[in-house]
Image (spheres, grey):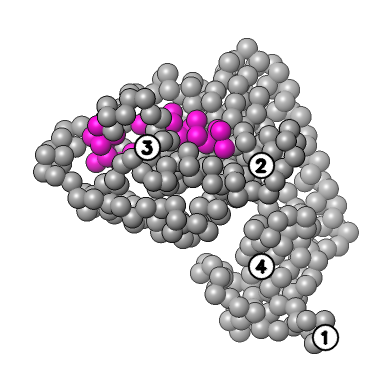
Amino acid sequence: MTKGPNVLAAGTKCLAFHGPLLYEAKIIKSYNPAVKQAMSRAPPSEGGEKKADISDLPSEFKEKVAYFVHYKGWKSTWDEWIAADRVLQWNEENLRTQKELKQAALAAVNQNKTKKTAASSSSTAGAATNGVSGSLAGETSSKRKDAPKEESGLSFSRSHKRSRPSGQDDLEREEDFIKRLEINIMVPDSLKSLLVDDWEYITKEHQLLSLPQKPNVVEILKKYRDSKPKMRVGSSEAEILDEVISGLKLYFDRSLGNMLLYRFERQQYLEIRKAHPDKEMSELYGAQHLLRLFVSLPNLIALTNMDPQGVSVLKDHLEDCLQFLAKNRDQLFTKAYENTSQRYEAFAKGV
């Protein structure tokens, strides 16, 4: 792979890594740490470059060369700042590298499909191959049978282990490990700060979100679906989007009690279930708990038998949904935290 030693100019066509593959992209802004400024293309009438706004430059890039890129054929919502090591010059050698990476990914998909066929007797694997919502439903159902009914609280770094068949060779283990590493859902910084605030309110201040929440998860997912452009009924795009939304709701309902609660919230969970026995959790909880699900999803997706192509499609839709949550955070995330009684605290500590 060849990369120019200098900062590439804005407007330059290039290749950029997104996940394990290279995509055609265009540099919208180029940031030079030596002068602490970025440049973008000036209007055609002026020619050359002009200073560009860097207010959205992530702090981790301020001491290194970085580029704000647009991936050809992708919506502008995927435009992003990336480090220089993810950008390659547009030349024959790097185009060959792009082709080789694509061929390797397709070979991995075909190999994974062969493994699935051999393991078709597994009901969980069968559910996972049916589609996005099938993957979520089958894996969660399988997990639920083995999971304890009550857990001490939410963990953002839960580790999951699956038993490996004896005699599995090193190549397969390495492939499985690389596949897991690739599942990286990007959470916008504005939502990360909400997660921190949420944690502090509940674990430090001993406050709780008022339930039932408005809007609830069902209503939020409907707003997200309504925000998408009109799609032809029955088209693959519409079907995939609906499967993702359906899968998110299903996963939320089945995992909230086991995975998404802090210990201090468990008594409230028991009380709200008793008060609303006919309601799903997605009808009672809202954006904060939905956001916690997104944080846990990479580990959960790694447990499914989805092939790399399916994981990539799912990842794109999940990150698009996160962008929607960030854009509408003031309308979707309630600030209705409330103090708890001494009675509640006594019960909560005993749960």
Which residue sits at x=63%, y=62%? 80
2 relative to 289 in the view: left or right = right
**Could you tell me residue 160's position as x and y percent?**
46, 32
- Res. 156 mark: none
Can you see residue 9?
A: yes
Of label 4 and label 3, which has the lower sequence position?
Answer: 4
- Res. 312 mark: 2
**Could you tell me residue 52's position as x and y percent?**
65, 79
Count neighbours of disc 1 (C-alpha within 10 A) and say few if under 14, some if 14 to 19, many if 20 or more.
few
Of label 1 and label 2, which has the lower sequence position?
Answer: 1
Type of amino acid at the residue the image marks with label 3? Leu
**Could you tell me residue 24's position as x and y percent?**
79, 57
In the image, is residue 270 part of the stretch drawn in magenta? yes
In the image, is residue 119 part of the stretch drawn in magenta? no
Q: Main secondary structure of the magenta part?
A: helix
The answer to which quarter of the image holds residue 72 is bottom right
Residue annotated with mark 3: 284
Type of amino acid at the residue the image marks with label 2? Ser
Q: CA distance from mark 4 to mark 2?
A: 22 Å
Callout 3: helix, strand or loop? loop
- Res. 68 mark: 4
Residue annotated with mark 1: 45
**Could you tell me residue 10's position as x and y percent?**
74, 74
Of label 4 and label 1, which has the lower sequence position?
Answer: 1
Count neighbours of disc 3 (C-alpha within 10 A) and say few if under 14, some if 14 to 19, many if 20 or more.
many
Q: CA distance from mark 3 to mark 2?
A: 30 Å
Type of amino acid at the residue the image marks with label 1? Ser
Q: Quadrant of the C terminus?
A: top left
Q: CA distance from mark 1 to mark 2?
A: 40 Å
- Report the span colored magenta: 245-271
Question: Comparing marks 4 and 3, which lies closer to the viewer?
Answer: 3
Of label 1 and label 3, which has the lower sequence position?
Answer: 1
